[in-house]
Every structure is written in structure tokens, then in C-alpha cells.
Image (cartoon, rainbow, N blue to C red):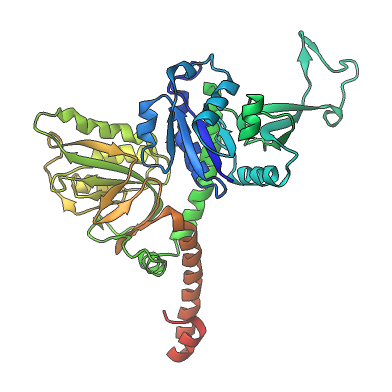
């Protein structure tokens, strides 16, 4: 049985300009949803349904398929059923998920549980996400409840509301009924956070506050872990997992330091002779994508010329970055060092990349010291090396790192107690 997920995202919108590409915690809204669906084990293919060439370019490195939407279906007059049926007619599958990026907090577990329920219960022909609330409703400027005897909220009738976030349907039922909800749908009850629908500017403000709170939970975890691990530990673990080429070796920090966060990437290339030098200033646009605990990583094609000095360091600090890694030289070294902002580089040079380089791209894959760096991957850097942790093994790496650090503390304690090496090896294995 083939299961596909489709994210519809047209380029323009009325209530919020270019709503689907607005940044949620430093990432375009539609990218946030595509990346989530890619991580769902039960989904065979993820599709982006869009009319926007810009969206297609932004998503070009994701392992997804593109369905180029016809202009006549990219307006607010398009019916949701027509949009769903258009996706069904263009994509071959048995089950279709239509997941709207304006519901950014739908959990992977919710998606997986819903698919399992649908597959294991043939009576359901579809699924729709809803929220259940007890509300003091009004109609025609009058309360719908007894205003003389106000009921307790627990006694109110349940109100079931579509969140407009997710629809799931079998192909044959969709083609027969010509709509995205069947005759016997399974109701997916969203949590309050999952039910958030981003359609107005105020919704975006709320969503960003929630996303920042979720991110801070991870940031606290990374900060706690960084206190007990090192580049040596992570490098050993990645070697054991079959990832021997994850260490950037030639870059050093201004002063002794350690940082542990997620990568935001930028690539600079040599300016063509007839090209405007203003292209370098596109690098300034990257700071709006930076969120707290990000690490800026730059591939510089003309690495003998300096990129990143005092002004960029201040912009990075303001955006929340915790460090910058440059595949090349930098400048303003003393002033940057005075900011106590970690910068890893090959050294210093007063000559700038201005008039010599332009931005090739950002938030896409780059290469430093023959090491591939993908956007949003985990990065750990200290005085001995910079370790790039591939996203597909980051949970394994963190779990092993915590186990190793605990073992090392026990080993050090046993060494201080004069335990023989043979006994240490028998107890802990080779170390």
C-alpha cells in the first residue's frame, strides 16, 4: 500500500503576504511541514503542490516530489475538494494525506497513529483533524445558552471544529465521492497546540512564541550535554557508526571555547568579471533565518580574503547565534574577540571579500574541508575540532555520548583507586 503526503502551498496569499513562506522560528512555513513529513516512517513519498518557482528552489535539496499547480487552481476561489482531487489525479497512491503548512504543530506521532488506525479499521474511509471544545456560543447577537442560568462549562455540549490542518483519504473513495472527507471519517482530535491554524498576523505571533518555547527545550538539552562531551568523544562515536569523515580539522577559534548547536549555512563564490559586487550584501539577508543557538557556517570559495568581522559578529549576536565557523580567514579579530563571540577560521586578513565574492546560496548544503554540512544538522566545535553530526544519526550519537561520558567518569574514579588496567578493560571494554 502506497501512502503519499502532499503539502499544498501557493505562492501568494491575501491575509498575510506570501504566508506559506513566512518564517516560523527561522524557517519557511512550508519547509517546516515538508521536513516533518519526511521523517514519518509510514509515508512513502512527500509532495509539494505549488505554483511558485521560488518555493521549488527553496525546497530543492529536500527528498520530495514537485507537483506544479496550474494557475487557475492557485487562487482563493479554489475549492478545497478541487485542490485535493487535483492532487489525487496527478499522484499515484492508495492513501493521500493533505497536510496544510498553516498547521505547523501537528505531531509526527499523531500522523503515524492516524494512519495505523485508518489501515487497521476498514470501516473508516477517511480521516479529518478536528478540535473538541466546550464553548459559550452566541448566535444572532444572543447567547445560545440560558443566560438566566449560566451552565458550568463541563455541562456544555461539545463543539467539534475542523482545524483545517490534515485530511486523509483512500484513492477510490476520493474519486467516487469527489471530495476530501468520506462518508465515515475517523476524527483526529488535535491537541490545543496541534489545532493552531496560522492565517492572520496575530496567529503568526502566537506560533512563533510557541515554536521558540519548543526550541528552547532542545537548546537547554544541548547546553547540558555540551558541558560533558568533547569533539574527541563525538568523533569516536561517529567512527563507530560508520561516519569517518565528519570532522573539520583546519579551523581554530580565536580563543579556547566550545559550542553545540544547529547549522545555518552560507556559501560565497568568486564574483564573475561582469557581475555586480552588490551580490555580497545578500549575506545580510541570512540573519533573519538565525534563531537562538544557531551556528553560522560559511563556505568561502576565495578563502584567502576575509569574510565576517566586527559588524557581522554583532548582527549574529543580535540574532541569537552562538558562534560562526568560516572556511577561510576573517578580520577585526581583536574586536570580535572582545565581544566574547566564538569564531573558528583559518586565520586573519585585513583584505575583505567585498568586490571579490558574491553569495551563491544559503540554507543549502555546503562543504568545508571535504566535510558535508547540511542545514540544521548538529554541530559541535571545540579547540580540537569541529564535528558535524548527520541528522539521521543524531539521536544515536547523543545517547552514546551520554553513556560514554558516564563510563569515563567511572573509569577515572577507578584509576584514582589504583584499579589495574586489565580489570578496567574487563569492566568497561577498551577505551
Query: Residue 328's x, y, as percent?
Result: 19, 50
Direction top: furthest residue = 140
Q: Dividing the image into 4 quarters, which one contains the C terminus? A: bottom left
In this view, the residue in front, 402 or 184, is 184
Give the vertical position of 111 relative to 252 (above or below): above
Query: Residue 368's x, y, as percent?
Result: 25, 53
Query: Residue 342's x, y, as percent?
Result: 31, 51
Q: Quadrant of residue 379?
A: bottom left
Direction left: furthest residue = 273
Tell me which residue sits at (15%, 45%) in the image. Answer: 302
Q: Quadrant of residue 389?
A: bottom left
Q: Quadrant of residue 250?
A: bottom left
Direction right: furthest residue = 149
Tell me which residue sits at (38%, 66%) in the image. Answer: 242
In this view, the residue in front, 410 or 394, is 394
Tell me which residue sits at (42%, 44%) in the image. Answer: 63
Instruction: Name the side, left or right, on which 240 lies relative to 270.
Output: right
Give the vertical position of 188 relative to 348 (above or below): above
Can residue 193 be seen in the rendering of this structure? yes
Amino acid at each position: 500500500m502506497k501512502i503519499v503526503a502532499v503539502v499544498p502551498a501557493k505562492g501568494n496569499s491575501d491575509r498575510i503576504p506570501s504566508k506559506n513562506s513566512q518564517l516560523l522560528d527561522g524557517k519557511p512555513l512550508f519547509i517546516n511541514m515538508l521536513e516533518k513529513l519526511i521523517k514519518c516512517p509510514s509515508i512513502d513519498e512527500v509532495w509539494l503542490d505549488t505554483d511558485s518557482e521560488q518555493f521549488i528552489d527553496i525546497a530543492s535539496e529536500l527528498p520530495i516530489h514537485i507537483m506544479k499547480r496550474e494557475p487557475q487552481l492557485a487562487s482563493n476561489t479554489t475549492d478545497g475538494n478541487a485542490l485535493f482531487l487535483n492532487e489525487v489525479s496527478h499522484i499515484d497512491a492508495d492513501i493521500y494525506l493533505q497536510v496544510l503548512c498553516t498547521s505547523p504543530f501537528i505531531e509526527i506521532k499523531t500522523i503515524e497513529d492516524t494512519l495505523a488506525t485508518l489501515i487497521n479499521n476498514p470501516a473508516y474511509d477517511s480521516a479529518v483533524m478536528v478540535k473538541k471544545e466546550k464553548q459559550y456560543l452566541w448566535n444572532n447577537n444572543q447567547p445560545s445558552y440560558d443566560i438566566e442560568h449560566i451552565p458550568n462549562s463541563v455541562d456544555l455540549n461539545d463543539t467539534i471544529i475542523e482545524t483545517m490542518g490534515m485530511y486523509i483519504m483512500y484513492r477510490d473513495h476520493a474519486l467516487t465521492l469527489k471530495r476530501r472527507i468520506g462518508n465515515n471519517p475517523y476524527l483526529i482530535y488535535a491537541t490545543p497546540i496541534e489545532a493552531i491554524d496560522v492565517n492572520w498576523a496575530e496567529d503568526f505571533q502566537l506560533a512563533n512564541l510557541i515554536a521558540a518555547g519548543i526550541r528552547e527545550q532542545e537548546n537547554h538539552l544541548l547546553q547540558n550535554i555540551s558541558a560533558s562531551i568533547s569533539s574527541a568523544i563525538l568523533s569516536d562515536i561517529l567512527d563507530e557508526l560508520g561516519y569517518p569523515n565528519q570532522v573539520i580539522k583546519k579551523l581554530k577559534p580565536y580563543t579556547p571555547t566550545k559550542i553545540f548547536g544547529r547549522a545555518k549555512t552560507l556559501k560565497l563564490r568568486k564574483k564573475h568579471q561582469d557581475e555586480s559586487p552588490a551580490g555580497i550584501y545578500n549575506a545580510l539577508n541570512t540573519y533573519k533565518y538565525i534563531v537562538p543557538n544557531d551556528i553560522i557556517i560559511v563556505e568561502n570559495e576565495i578563502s584567502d580574503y576575509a569574510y565576517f568581522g566586527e559588524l557581522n559578529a554583532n548582527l549574529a549576536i543580535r540574532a541569537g547565534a552562538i558562534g560562526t565557523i568560516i572556511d577561510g580567514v576573517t578580520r577585526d579579530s581583536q574586536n570580535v574577540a572582545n565581544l566574547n563571540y566564538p569564531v573558528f577560521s583559518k586565520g586573519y586578513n585585513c583584505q575583505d571579500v567585498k568586490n571579490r565574492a558574491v553569495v551563491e546560496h544559503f540554507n543549502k548544503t555546503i562543504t568545508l574541508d571535504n566535510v558535508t554540512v547540511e542545514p540544521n544538522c548538529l554541530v559541535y566545535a571545540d579547540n580540537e575540532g569541529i564535528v558535524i553530526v548527520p541528522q539521521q544519526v543524531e539521536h544515536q550519537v547523543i545517547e552514546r555520548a551520554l553513556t560514554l561520558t558516564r563510563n569515563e567518569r567511572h573509569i577515572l574514579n577507578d584509576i584514582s583507586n589504583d584499579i589495574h588496567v586489565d580489570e578496567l578493560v574487563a569492566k568497561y571494554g577498551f577505551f
